[in-house]
Image: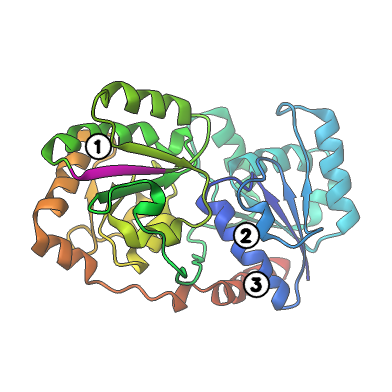
């Protein structure tokens, strides 16, 4: 079967990480694939085989040259199915389908598309309306890291208690709330530090905010893009997830590492995190609530031990297992 993965980007998101794990696993199962990348390449393009990724650039949503190139790249590959990953890809493919009869005849699979009130969300929803929508996409997790990253390698004190937050530094990942919540929390103890992993348009704002509120006592650390988030998790005391949607991959990785999770109470995250059993959920927007939840974990060893005790095996979410699930989805969609 010939599959085109139309990716919104290969930047620091759980969606891109999942694709970087899925494509090699599908290749091992004999599937022919092409990843058409519409956004950033780093950090996950390097995890895909040479020649597998084609970059198509759009200067704007209505870039005719970009649309022509996208149509050509997909048509030359002659896919049996197109898998659209994320809102940006969904919007651009919606635009392409309106102008190409061939695009309308291909089996279309959509995942990681979020309906929002803005124009982008509405157009993405239109693409999803005419597709096989996978709302609970199979999770993919990498195997255990070897060796794990220690506090010293991250530039932190050896005795630091580390709160890890990771994401794309975009609006939906809400890194500002992570910085604000930690600014409240840090006054409760001198040995706690916030480690912010990732990059994106809101990084400069989040970093400036951390430097302003942390003047004279800066314990928020920005380490940029890293593919080895799984290797960092063993050093964490807790993991903070402030995604307004998405965040499932980071949550699953934290749970697999047996680390307590504090997160917004969203449908995506509540599907994995059971409040009081393997993490603590907070109503979205309640930044003091995030601080209180983290404080409970830091000061109540019985609670922390309870949250760490729920095992989450990696085998269920191995790339090969997920690849077989996706194979079945593609074949069902193709009829």
- Upstream in the sequence, badge 3 or badge 2? 2
User: Which secondary structure dominates the residues rendered in magenta?
Assistant: strand
* Residue at 55% over, 77% down: 321
Q: Are marks 3 and 2 in contact (CB under 8 Å)?
A: no
Is 226 above or below relative to 183? Answer: below
Q: Which residue is mark 2?
A: 20
Q: Position of residue 106 (x, y in %)?
A: 78, 57
Q: Can you tell which quarter of the image residue 232 is in?
A: bottom left
Q: Residue at x 20, y 64 (%)?
A: 307
Residue at coordinates 58% horizontally, 32% vertically from top-left? Answer: 120
Q: Position of residue 92 (x, y in %)?
A: 71, 38
Q: Is residue 135 left or right of residue 269?
A: right
Which class describes the residues within 10 Å of circle 1: few (<14), some (14-19), or many (20+)?
Answer: many
In the rendered structure, the answer to whether residue 224 lies left or right of residue 123 reads left
Task: State which mark lies toward you, 1 or 3.
Answer: 1
Q: Work out whether mark 1 precedes mark 3 in sequence or the reverse, and give the earlier one.
A: 3
Q: What mark, if any, has residue 182 been given in the picture?
A: 1
Tell me the magenta residue range: 191-196
């Amino acid at each position: 079967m010939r599959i085109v993965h139309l990716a919104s980007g290969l930047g620091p998101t759980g969606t891109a990480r999942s694709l970087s794990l899925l494509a090699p696993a599908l290749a091992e199962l004999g599937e022919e694939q092409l990843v058409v990348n519409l956004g950033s390449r780093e950090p996950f393009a390097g995890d895909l085989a040479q020649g597998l990724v084609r970059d198509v650039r759009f200067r704007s949503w209505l870039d005719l040259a970009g649309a022509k190139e996208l149509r050509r790249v997909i048509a030359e590959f002659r896919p049996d199915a197109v898998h659209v990953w994320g809102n940006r890809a969904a919007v651009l493919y919606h635009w392409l389908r309106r102008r190409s009869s061939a695009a309308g005849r291909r089996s279309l699979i959509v995942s990681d598309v979020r309906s929002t009130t803005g124009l982008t969300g509405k157009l993405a929803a239109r693409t999803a309306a005419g597709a096989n929508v996978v709302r609970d996409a199979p999770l993919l997790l990498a195997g255990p890291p070897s060796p794990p990253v220690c506090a010293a390698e991250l530039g932190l004190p050896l005795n630091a208690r580390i709160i890890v937050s990771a994401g794309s530094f975009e609006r939906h990942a809400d890194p500002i709330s992570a910085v604000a919540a930690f600014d409240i929390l840090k006054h409760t103890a001198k040995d706690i530090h916030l480690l912010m992993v990732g990059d994106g348009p809101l990084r400069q704002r989040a970093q400036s905010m951390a430097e302003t509120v942390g003047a004279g006592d800066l314990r928020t650390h920005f380490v940029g893009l890293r593919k080895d988030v799984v290797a960092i998790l063993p050093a964490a005391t807790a993991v903070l997830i402030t995604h307004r949607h998405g965040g499932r991959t980071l949550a699953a990785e934290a749970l697999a590492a047996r680390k307590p999770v504090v997160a917004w109470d969203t449908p995506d995250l509540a599907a994995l995190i059971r409040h009081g059993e393997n993490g603590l959920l907070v109503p979205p927007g309640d930044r003091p609530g995030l601080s209180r939840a983290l404080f409970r974990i830091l000061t109540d060893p019985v609670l922390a031990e309870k949250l760490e005790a729920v095992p989450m095996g990696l085998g269920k979410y191995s790339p090969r297992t997920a690849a077989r699930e996706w194979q079945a989805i593609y074949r069902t969609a193709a009829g």
